[in-house]
Image: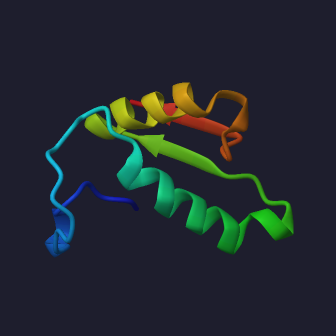
Amino acid sequence: MISFRGQSGAELITPMMHNALSVNDIKEPMEYVYKKLSKDRNIKAFALGCSMGANILSNLLGIDKEDSILSAAVCV
């Protein structure tokens, strides 16, 4: 599970305003998990986004297009 900036008690270490379209906070951890668990073992990666998470996930898919590490995604 990847949370938004400052959620779940995570300390904010960079000065950045909230932006509902920003994919920066989810792209890095998604790529980390993918490289750690999926890439070398040829396992497909999937994502599920709900509410604002769906907004950010769909924006990320639009930015990455064919270069996305995800095989499928669901935005609810």
Displayed quadrant of residue 18? top left
Residue 8 relative to residue 74: left or right: left
For the C terminus, the quadrant is: top left
State the scheme by which the image is colored. Answer: rainbow
Residue 23 relative to residue 43: left or right: left
Vertical comparison of 8 with 5: above or below: below
Of residues 51 and 59, the one drawn nearer to the viewer in this rendering: 59
Residue 13 image point, x, y percent: 20, 71
Counting the numbered discs, the total is 0
Of residues 70 and 65, the one drawn nearer to the viewer in this rendering: 65
Of residues 67 and 48, the one drawn nearer to the viewer in this rendering: 67
Residue 74 relative to residue 35: left or right: left
Residue 27 image point, x, y percent: 48, 51
Residue 20 image point, x, y percent: 24, 34
Residue 19 image point, x, y percent: 21, 37
Q: Residue at x 54, y 25 (%)?
A: 62
Vertical comparison of 61 with 69: above or below: above
Of residues 11 and 1, the one drawn nearer to the viewer in this rendering: 11
Q: Residue at x 67, y 52 (%)?
A: 45
Vertical comparison of 3 with 54: above or below: below
Displayed quadrant of residue 63? top right
Displayed quadrant of residue 7? bottom left
Q: Residue at x 16, y 74 (%)?
A: 11
For the N terminus, the quadrant is: bottom left
